[in-house]
């Protein structure tokens, strides 16, 4: 017989699960066709990339577990081919939360070495773990084109990947790019301002004016949008490095809105990361250099 304390814990867990599920009830998965074979899916969490064709379905990221059924249903509307591969652009739960469900649906999970390491540290189920990992880069061929996968070091995290569809001319950046908003740079998981800027530079080298860019968060982008994002990063880095060099303290930088005003006025701080948080992130990362 369970004790009152045990029953209370079970009720709390049940309530937490109910609310977590309920949080996603109203979420709709929207599908945008990019080319004959590639699509972008939006829901809650990181944007999803899809390649379809006779070779099967190739997926980039999978948002949260409660959305897996909706995501798989959306995929079925564009292809009746089996799920073949899933690549995680990094380890955060809004990009890997559906891993176990996708594995059960037939996907072979691929990610950078550090993604697997961090998912193991989070005590993820065995089914949610990548079975193929890479260190620097990886090339896959599916649905008539080569997909180049590049690791970008210490950017958003320590396990980020960019994926470029060489024939479709589509780039998926993972969370190394937040379109039109300040990014989340996870300093506690190996991310850094310097690495984040270098990741954007590397992404820009891969593309041209016609490339369609799937950002980790935000609307579908193009090269001009991406260059604007890089300019924002470099401007903030310069402003905050100058403040550090002038002897400004962490609190002074955090509270000095003039350092980010140009982009605050363009609503970059209206997302998950506000202007105070981005100033603090840049200060902590640049101060360590």
Image (cartoon, grey):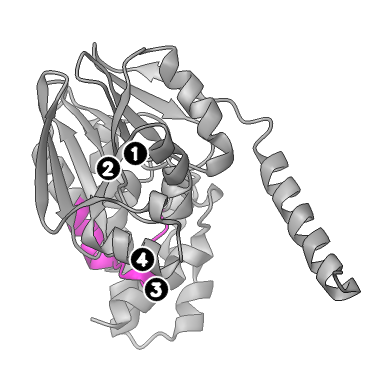
Mark 4, Cα crowd under 10 Å, few <14 / some 14-19 / many 20+, is some
Q: Earlier in the sequence, mark 3 or mark 1?
A: 3
Q: Earlier in the sequence, mark 2 or mark 1?
A: 2
Q: Is residue 188 magenta?
A: yes
Q: How far is disc 3 from disc 1 in space, using C-alphas?
A: 22 Å
Q: In the structure shown, which secondary structural element does the residue marked by tag 1 occupy?
A: loop
Mark 1, Cα crowd under 10 Å, few <14 / some 14-19 / many 20+, is many
Mark 2, Cα crowd under 10 Å, few <14 / some 14-19 / many 20+, is many
Q: Nearer the viewer, residue 284 or 231?
A: 284
Q: Position of residue 53 (x, y in %)?
A: 23, 15
Q: How far is disc 3 from disc 2 in space, using C-alphas?
A: 20 Å
Q: Position of residue 101 (x, y in %)?
A: 47, 39
The image quarter in which residue 48 lies = top left
Q: Earlier in the sequence, mark 3 or mark 2?
A: 2
Q: Position of residue 139 (x, y in %)?
A: 9, 39
Q: Are marks 2 and 1 in contact (CB under 8 Å)?
A: yes
For label 4, the residue is 118
Q: How far is disc 3 from disc 4 in space, using C-alphas?
A: 12 Å
Q: How many marks?
A: 4
Q: How far is disc 2 from disc 1 in space, using C-alphas?
A: 5 Å
Q: In the structure shown, which secondary structural element does the residue marked by tag 4 occupy?
A: helix
- Which residue is drawn at the image coordinates 74% and 46% (left, top)? 18
Q: Earlier in the sequence, mark 3 or mark 4?
A: 4
Q: Quadrant of the N terminus?
A: bottom right
Q: Which mark is residue 166?
A: none
For this view, does 223 lie left or right of residue 206? right
For label 2, the residue is 173
Q: Magenta stretch: give its range.
A: 183-199
Query: Depth-wise, is mark 3 or mark 1 nearer the camera?
Result: 3
């Amino acid at each position: 017989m369970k004790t009152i304390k045990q029953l209370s814990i079970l009720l709390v867990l049940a309530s937490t699960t109910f609310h977590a599920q309920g949080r996603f009830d109203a979420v709709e998965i929207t599908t945008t066709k990019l080319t004959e074979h590639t699509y972008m899916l939006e829901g809650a969490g990181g944007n999803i990339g899809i390649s379809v064709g006779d070779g099967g379905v190739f997926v980039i990221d999978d948002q949260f577990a409660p959305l897996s059924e909706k995501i798989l249903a959306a995929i079925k509307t564009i292809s009746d081919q089996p799920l073949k591969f899933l690549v995680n652009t990094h380890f955060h739960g809004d990009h890997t939360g559906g891993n176990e469900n996708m594995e059960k649906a037939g996907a072979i999970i691929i990610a950078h070495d550090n993604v697997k390491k961090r998912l193991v540290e989070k005590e993820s189920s065995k089914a949610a773990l990548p079975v193929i990992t890479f260190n620097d880069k990886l090339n896959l061929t599916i649905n008539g084109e080569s997909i180049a996968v590049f690791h970008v070091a210490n950017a958003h995290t320590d396990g980020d990947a960019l994926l470029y569809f060489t024939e479709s001319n589509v780039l998926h950046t993972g969370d190394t790019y937040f379109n039109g908003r300040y990014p989340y740079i996870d300093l506690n998981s190996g991310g850094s301002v310097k690495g984040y800027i270098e990741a954007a530079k590397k992404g820009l080298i891969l593309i041209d004016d016609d490339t369609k860019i799937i950002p980790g968060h935000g609307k579908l982008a193009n090269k001009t949008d991406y260059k604007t994002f890089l300019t924002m990063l470099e401007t903030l880095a310069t402003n905050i490095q100058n403040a550090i060099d002038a002897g400004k303290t962490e609190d002074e930088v955090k509270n000095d809105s003039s350092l980010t005003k140009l982009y605050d006025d363009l609503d970059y701080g209206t997302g998950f990361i506000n202007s105070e948080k981005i100033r603090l992130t840049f200060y902590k990362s640049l101060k360590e250099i």
